[in-house]
Image (spheres, rainbow, N blue to C red):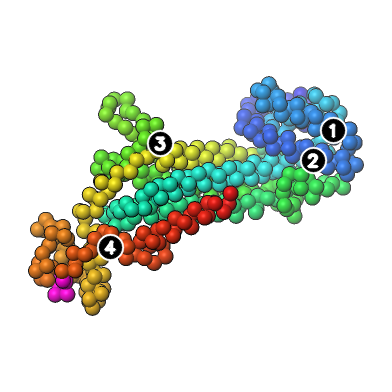
Amino acid sequence: MSLIRGRFQKEADAAVCRYTASIPFDWRLYHYDIAGSIAHAQMLAKQGIIAEKDSKEIVRGLKVIKKEIEDGKFQFKLELEDIHMCIESRLIEIVGDAGARLHTARSRNDQVALDLRLYTRDAIEITIDYIRDLQQALIGLAEENQKTIFPGYTHLQRAQPVLLSHHFLAYFEMLQRDILRLSDSLTRVDVMPLGSGALAGVPYKIDRGLVARKLGFSQISRNSLDAVSDRDFVIEYEAAASLCMMHLSRLAEEIILWSTAEFGFIELDEAYTTGSSIMPQKKNPDVAELARGKVGRVYGKLFAMLTVMKGLPLAYNRDLQEDKEGLFDVVDTLLSTLEVMTGMLKTLKINPARMSQALDKGYLLATDIADYLVTKGETFRGAHAVVGQLVHWAIENDKTFDKIKVEEYKKFSKLIEKDIYKLTSEVSVKARDNTGGTSPVKVEEALTEAKRILEEKK
Ligand code: ARG
């Protein structure tokens, strides 16, 4: 029998029960619900609102329940709606009247806000750890490939030579921004809402600071109406996760491209590839494809939650129950994607020979030749035009830069001398020696800095 239908003559319709229940998904909050209830009960006893012996009984009962859930023996009942009622009702079965005192000075509205904040706080910390693992894998690749030069692309056309390490460290930067966004959002998750009651606060002399300290919060909410209806922190996590998934999808896309026969830059480990049901020769990058594809559902959940919140009047409304499935799915999707991407990066093989072959074709040194002319006194725009004509001629005559004779070069600009042949990919890369550039010196510095960032937070 429901604990909260005293004013009703009828039980809820079965379809209504199924429609409104959140227990099929919010059972996952049990651990946080119990932690919150223990802190609340202990505070109530300390303030003399309930007896010390009742608080002890409550804590004992809650621990029994936790064990029952973890042993798979707990009965989650749909008719009890949610994890909060399931636990409270079982508590009353176990410890009787003491259990019936737990909900003093509390509402499910502030209780669920608390549970979700505790969940999100943990999710953020775990996510940051997972992102760091991926950053570590990128650092490993960057470290092993400090000498490998390959084509950097713009518009997916070969553009200029870059160090492969530099390319991997670009993803380190994206992930570092993800970490900063997530840790910044912690400040706003770190607010303890209990004591807000249903919406207006509670008429007991509670000690909110004590509950906050017990649960490791550094702030308490300042407005009860806001506290029970604020889900900004859910949206913030989903937004940060959306950006992170977007970064992962970019990395996944490059892995997919690079592992094609056309590129052949990398080879994926067999443990991170799948076969085809019809084509026996296939070794497919499904992990990377799914990582790329799963971004859609994460963006979707972000939009769903933004839409749930739009136009919602103060304070609690049942619409808010729609926060959980999306958030859980976003956390699960992001963590599993980070996990497989890390494994995939740690095991992939680089094919430096194919990378350097790709450097030979594509006139990647064209900008360097223009810069060469600039050092000899040509304007940059003038040099750009000269090299443009030179490339056109070279393509027509099927010649790479190193195969063009000085006399032929001279037809395009008198400023070109024998030293033109000193221009190589190595020289090109080495010349880009400002902070953020791809020179071996700067990349080495960036790598050291990346390692320091990763060490710092340990
Ligand atoms: N299951 C509800 C939720 O997830 C808990 C809060 C219910 N509060 C209420 N007044 N019905 O939002």
Residue at the spot x=32%, y=63% of the render? 430
Looking at marks 3 and 1 on the same chain, the residue that comes earlier in the sequence is marked by 1
Q: Is residue 282 left or right of residue 236?
A: left
Looking at marks 3 and 4 on the same chain, the residue that comes earlier in the sequence is marked by 3
| Residue 427 tag number | 4
Please give the count of numbered marks on the rendered protein. 4
| Residue 40 tag number | 2
Circle 3: element type: helix
Circle 2: element type: helix
Give the residue at mark 1. Answer: 56
Callout 3 amino acid: Val
- Give above or below for 267 relative to 176: above
Residues packed near mark 2 inside 10 Å, few (<14), some (14 to 19) or many (20 plus): many
- Locate the N terminus and report the quarter of the image it occupies: top right
Looking at marks 3 and 2 on the same chain, the residue that comes earlier in the sequence is marked by 2
Which residue is at the far bottom? Answer: 377
